Image (cartoon, rainbow, N blue to C red):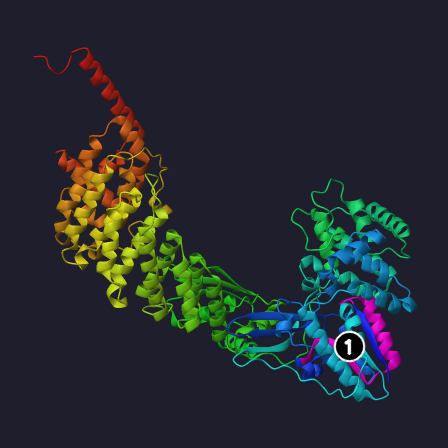
Amino acid sequence: MAVTFIGVRHHSPACARLVAATIDELRPAYVLIEGPADLNDRIDELLLGHELPIAIFTSYRDEERRLGSWAPMCAYSPEWVALTHGQAAGAELRFIDLPAWHPALEGRSNRYADAELRYADVMERLCRSFDVDNVDVLWDHLFEFAPEDELAERLATYFDLVRGESAAGESDTAREAYMASWVRAATAAAGDRPVVVITGGFHRPALVAATDDHSGAGWPEVPTLPEGALGGSFLVPYSFRRLDAFDGYQSGMPSPAYYQELWESGLERAAQHLVESVAGRLRERKQAVSTADLIAARATAEGLATVRGHRHPARTDVLDGLASALVNEALDVPLPWSSRGTLRAGSHPVVVEMVAALSGTRVGRLHPGTPAPPLVHDLDVSLARFGLDGEADLDLDLTQPAERDRSQVLHRVRVLGVPGFHRGSGPSTGLDPVLRERWVLRPDPGRLTAVIEAGAYGATLSDACAAVLAERAAAAGRDVDALAAVLFDAALAGITDVSDQALADIDATVAAAADLGALGRMLAVVLTMWRHDRIFGTARTATSGRVIVAAVRRILWLAEGVRGGPAPADLPRIAALAACRDGLRHAGVALGLDIADALEVAGRVAADSGAPPDLRGAAFGLQWALADLTPGSGTDAAGAGADAAGADAAGADAVGADAVGADAVGLGADAVGLGADEAGSGADVAGVGADALRVVRGAFVPQSAGDWLAGLFALAREEVLHAEGVVGLLDELLSGMSADDFLVALPALRQAFEFFPPRERETIAGRLLARRGLGGTGRSLLRGVTEPEVVAAGMRLDEQVEALLLREGLVGGRD
């Protein structure tokens, strides 16, 4: 009995030829292949007659981790050749490696990533010895051009050198011990017949040493999924692009289209095909490639092959020749085939097209009888049921139940990342009044692959979508904007219930958030959906309610810790307090929020001279806006605000603020969500109005008044408008400013008054006219307003004239 070990580099035509020749010659009893042992009872699925490339996709999910792993195979993969030639020879076929979900393969999304890449120091020494740029060029030089009668010996020597005397890591040791148990069992079962073992070359030396003793060996058990875990393996279509090392794949073999031609037609034809592919692709993209260019490229490639010792031009010989002939200017980055890794940003456009031509466009196709995960069937049924399974351009009216159902299916597909479903327009935040969606549906060759891979999340479209959203919520960390996107996607997809773990992750994200602006944006969206969203079915859901409670508490907690002197008003944090106000007003009672406690926090912020002026103004506005919800709180709040404003009046520094319109924070009349019917009547706030006059007067320091007013107007715009005397007081204070003070305060004041929508500004203008006893309307006054800079210049001129008259004794003091 003999065991033949063949160490291979995955996706190598030379190794594939050696495997085929060995199996054909020995006709072994068993062919053992590095691959997932949990697929052994389904190996027949691999041999149904697929169009390559394909891959074995394994998914795994439990409470602590989720993974997806691929074991790709193309026509020149030694593993694939072992399967097909082993079947033809009548051998028993076995995969002998641990399942992809096993902890020994943790972090390996690609089972067939070459192990020698983990031993970079050895590879660097070999590359220096042979004077080549990288391991890909070294491999071609040593093996793809090697005579067939020398290949086996060269491979064994090479992998022995790569492995050396160093001990493997724990994961490789565990895998090799498991594979060795399969080898011992197969040799014992084979009797006098041969056994052929095909594994990555790195593992070969260890397996040879571990299988000397074959006595008493039984077939090893295949590990089963841990209790509570979900997972499985299925075949998926693959593509040359996903197989290409230049696109990020870790196989160690770039340019799959080139190696496919090498496998099918040999070295000389592969070089010719490479030139033809590059020239054809460049010409399709209107790049000039002349016959003279191609002759020069061929001559250069042949010269390089001679110098480098190749009997025919190798891949890099041809590429270097093409680059020399077609790229006439200096390169910003090195040629991609001179190193390992993905294509770098800044690569020359001609070079990018060359790499793409070598990658190829081939996409695999599974045999129609290939088993698929339940999600594939559920998606097919859902698409057919709603008429979404063909090519279409859709315009959906979300107010219509039938079209809303179609939209939810499409959003579930979108969340799963299935290609071929593109939404051109539709609601984007939950605040926009968009009630139509446009979708473009087109067939896509990657659709089946994406759906099979998404099957790791669940058996149905709804379950899989919910699992993806839960995963995104867990990954949000402190990114509240990401969490808001998750919640809105859940609404669009009709996913109203989430798991306890997802709720815990949402709570954790909100609890860890440090950005007031982001929290405010999320709260505004979720509150709108909780209050009004009958279209997406999110009104009064438990999930949105829980987010509202957590966000309101977090915003108040963060606001109390903000410190800073006079500065331009921070519009996002003002918006956060406005969202907090709306949450307390519209959901506080229903969700059990303590409004009195919230007002106490606001009172402390309003009275804190160390807090920024805009935040103090917003905190006082929050108290004022909610005064009608807690009897007696309005007067106390106003008093606290007045004390704070008076204390701050003496220490304000100058500040330069850019004029930013209300659109910058989305807090116009509609955005804050407060109509006159919601804000409370003048009678409701009359008790606060008298103290508000004192507060405003105390806070009106030119250097910070505009910022303080911005916070106040954003939170209590309606209250200011209805309170007796506040508009008149502001007129008095503004009119009494010097020209210099007015210019200093102007940017912040303009920003503050932008919180009033046009109709309310017209009301204010009308009151100013009446206060001065002038005729006309507010609208006419607004239309005739001179630019504030001109007003300031006029004020300065008036002051200069008055000072001159006083100096000359022409006014004041004379009879």
Residue 157 location (% of width, % of height): 85, 65
State whether residue 743 is above or below residue 577.
above
Residue 1 location (% of width, % of height): 86, 85
**Residue found at the far left of this picture:** 815
Q: Is residue 54 magenta?
A: no
Does residue 730 appear in this view? yes
Of the 4 image quadrants, the one containing the C terminus is top left
Does residue 386 appear in this view? no
Left or right: 377 in relation to 55: left
In front here: 279 or 692? 692
Which of the 4 image quarters holds residue 518? bottom left
In front here: 431 or 739? 739
State whether residue 661 is above or below residue 66.
above
Magenta highlight range: 9-37
Left or right: 90 in relation to 245: right
Mark 1 = which residue?
Answer: 210
State whether residue 528 is above or below residue 725.
below
Mark 1: which amino acid?
Ala
Residue drawn where x is 20% and y is 51% of the image:
624
Which of the 4 image quarters holds residue 172? bottom right
Q: Residues within 10 Å of mark 1 (few under 14, many from 20)?
A: some
